Amino acid sequence: MPKLPKGKKAICVYIEAEFLTKFIEMVKRNNEGFFGLSAEVEDALRSWYAIKNTHHDTQIKLNPSPKSYAVMRHIKEYLKQKYGGFTPQQVSSRDLKEAISAIRGNDRRTISKWLREFLKYGQIKVLNPNVYELL
């Protein structure tokens, strides 16, 4: 086995033979020889990791549940009436909790549940502990 470059580790993986042949041919074309295989595999792994890691960290469900969407619509209507005819983009925690209380009930567990649901489905964003942005 060849000497390992500093800061590198060797791995052994099992890959379908036909795919490996195509991959090696591509590496030879792109790097004018076989020497670029490690760099190409590392680039592929880094790209794969970036895609997978980003998705897990920032994934938002694109289609909120109909119930969550309907409740948010009612809350925006409530806030629109409270603010005199326009729906604010940013609301205080107190006003949002008041709207949830008026629409769904004033139990603290209910309020917490709906705040979690709205955050989960990307319908609100916390700007600071006392201010939410309605999305």
Image: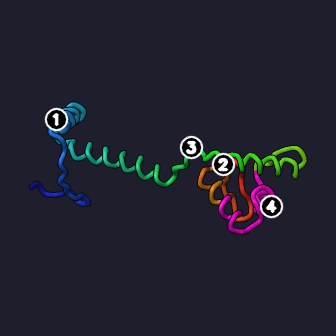
Q: Are marks 4 and 1 in contact (CB under 8 Å)?
A: no
- Between 114 and 85, the one lying in front of the other is 114
Q: Which residue is mark 3?
A: 62
Which region shows up in magenta?
Answer: 90-115
Q: CA distance from mark 4 to mark 1?
A: 62 Å
Q: Which residue is mark 1?
A: 18
Q: Are marks 3 and 2 in contact (CB under 8 Å)?
A: no
Residue shown at 74% from the left, 64% from the top: 130
Residue shown at 85% from the left, 44% from the top: 86
Q: CA distance from mark 1 to mark 2?
A: 49 Å
Q: Which residue is mark 4?
A: 98
- Disc ID at residue 112: none
Q: Nearest to the eye among marks 1 and 2: give it.
A: 2
Q: CA distance from mark 3 to mark 4?
A: 27 Å
Side of 95 where 126 appears, left or right:
left
Q: Which residue is mark 2?
A: 67
Mark 4: which amino acid? Glu
